[in-house]
Image (cartoon, helix red, strand yellow):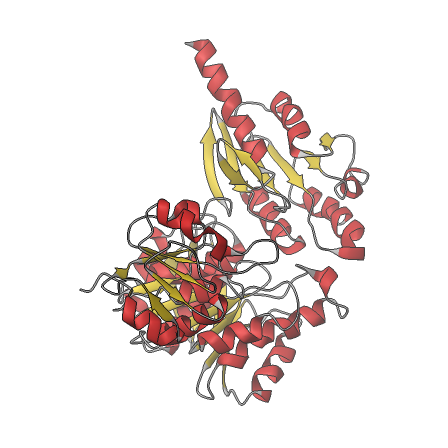
């Protein structure tokens, strides 16, 4: 099997660029950060709002890069490919790479859960063939072409997520990717401050994923959403007729019937019951797993062969992973937060089978605009309904929740995670189950790694119990 992605001549031809220096080379990976470059890498010098990546081409070479793709001449840097526009050249490479897939390409968007759903689907598809997946959350106008352009030379399936924070951001991504299957996980108030029409505006923006589908493309929609009919109409406007749904709604093409605390699921798929065990906790994960069953069945795969593998799935870091730290069970939901994902995490904490206390440590949900006070305050009823024992709040917006909590629920409030951490540590008891969740905001360095702000709480719990252990020894 060929291991390199592109050779020099292919890169020059596709990007309509000019080779500078020798031409007998090939690359295995792309990098945008010169500091991460190593042998076998092609450094892509993209011009951004603050920096021009081409200015760092020499640094990339010194770090070991094989070559660079730049939009202006860089002194002493060879070999290189000189192009008119680095981003446009990257898009041309992505278009060429799209032709490498032998089978289906899946695109996933939604307000909540798209990354986890993408990872689940890719893990399952690997049992059917070579599967390429977009890395992390590289889902915007740079991230998607950057990922797509690195598609292996031999590949069967592709799974990509498409993200947005404003209208008309998903449409060009979908047109670049040209997916054969498009999945929308849900419509929820994420980035709602950027949409004058509120949730309705978000629904229209998510429907842009249909723009890259051909007339015989497959669309899979959340049947329980209040915007289901809107999404159906948007798909039909684009000439799409293969429209299917998932959820708890009885008319869904795949309907979640039952879910046990142990993850045993019974769903009805195309009128027939299927049973499987899902190792990922939470009703939202169970519902999304149904979307994957539906997607695989619609592209002709034998769903029965994949059912045993649902029990092998594992949650992503910061997105629902449980860890035991010094006698405390920690639910790591630090990656990000919106009202929908916050409610799902609180529900997951509440459903946790334990005789011990359930503690919620939650931070501000960002980009909610005028709706922020109401959205934060509304969590109080949700926390009570799921039997949470103590609540620690972090951030200015969370004051709206703090002021609605009974004294018996109040664990502590602080303006940021650094000041909240000591309050959490002082209030913990052995056996507690602790949810930690909040929006990323400005990331902070933790042990040399840039991390979501609420990860400070988990790091403090780790440090505290390491100190206790050391003291005991």
Q: Where is residue 55 in the image (x, y as percent from the top left)?
A: 49, 53
Residue at the spot 53% in from the left edge and 21% down from the top edge: 464
**Percent from the top left, x then y, of residue 368?**
73, 55
| Side of 343 relative to 47 (left or right) | right
Side (left or right) of 103 relative to 459: left
The quadrant where residue 202 appears: bottom right
Q: Is any atom of residue 346 visible in this view?
A: yes
The image quadrant where one finds the N terminus is bottom left
Q: In this view, does 406 lie above or below 151?
A: above
How far across and how far down the image is residue 178, in percent? 45, 78
**The one of 193 and 344 positioned closer to us in this rendering:** 193
- The image quadrant of residue 265 is bottom left
Q: Is residue 375 or residue 456 the one in the foreground?
A: 456
- In this rendering, would 1 be left or right of 163? left
Position of the C terminus by quadrant:
top left
Which residue: 52% across, 72% down?
173
Residue drawn 77% across the image and 47% down it: 377
Residue positioned 41% across, 75% down in the render: 95
């Amino acid at each position: 099997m060929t291991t390199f992605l592109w050779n020099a001549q292919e890169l020059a031809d596709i990007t309509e660029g000019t080779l500078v220096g020798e031409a007998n080379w090939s690359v295995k990976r792309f990098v945008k950060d010169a500091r991460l470059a190593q042998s076998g890498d092609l450094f892509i010098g993209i011009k951004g709002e603050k920096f021009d990546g081409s200015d760092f081409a020499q640094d990339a070479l010194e770090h070991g890069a094989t070559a660079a793709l730049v939009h202006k001449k860089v002194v002493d840097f060879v070999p290189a490919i000189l192009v008119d526009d680095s981003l446009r050249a990257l898009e041309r490479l992505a278009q060429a790479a799209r032709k490498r897939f032998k089978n289906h390409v899946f695109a996933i968007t939604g307000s909540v859960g798209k990354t986890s759903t993408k990872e689940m689907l890719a893990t399952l598809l690997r049992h059917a063939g070579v599967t390429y997946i977009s890395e992390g959350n590289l889902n915007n106008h740079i991230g998607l072409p950057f990922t797509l352009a690195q598609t292996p030379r031999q590949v069967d399936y592709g799974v990509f997520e498409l993200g947005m924070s404003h209208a008309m951001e998903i449409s060009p991504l979908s047109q670049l990717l040209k997916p054969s299957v498009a999945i929308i996980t849900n419509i929820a108030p994420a980035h709602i401050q950027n949409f004058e029409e509120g949730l309705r505006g978000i629904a229209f923006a998510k429907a842009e994923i249909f723009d890259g589908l051909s007339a015989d493309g497959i669309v899979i929609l959340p049947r329980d959403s209040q915007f289901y009919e809107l999404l159906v109409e948007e798909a039909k406007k684009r000439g799409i007729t293969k429209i299917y749904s998932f959820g708890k709604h009885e008319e869904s093409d795949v309907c979640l019937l039952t879910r046990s605390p142990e993850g045993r699921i019974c769903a009805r798929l195309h009128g027939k019951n299927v049973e499987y065990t899902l190792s990922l906790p939470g009703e939202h994960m169970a519902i999304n797993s149904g979307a994957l069953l539906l997607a695989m069945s619609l592209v002709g795969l034998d769903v029965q062969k994949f059912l045993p593998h649902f029990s092998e799935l594992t949650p992503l870091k910061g997105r629902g992973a449980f860890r035991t730290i010094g006698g405390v069970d920690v639910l790591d939901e630090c990656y990000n937060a919106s009202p929908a994902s916050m409610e799902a995490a609180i529900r997951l904490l509440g459903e946790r089978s334990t005789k011990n206390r359930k503690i919620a440590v939650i931070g501000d949900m960002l980009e909610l605009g005028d709706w922020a006070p109401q959205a934060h305050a509304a969590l109080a009823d949700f926390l009570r309904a799921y039997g949470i024992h103590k609540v620690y709040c972090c951030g200015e917006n969370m004051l709206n929740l703090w002021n609605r909590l009974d004294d018996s629920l109040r664990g502590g409030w602080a303006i940021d995670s650094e000041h909240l951490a000591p309050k959490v540590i002082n209030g913990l008891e052995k056996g507690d189950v602790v949810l930690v969740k909040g929006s990323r905001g400005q990331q902070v360095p933790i042990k040399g790694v840039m991390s979501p702000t609420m990860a400070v709480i988990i790091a403090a719990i780790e440090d505290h119990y390491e100190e206790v252990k050391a003291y005991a020894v």
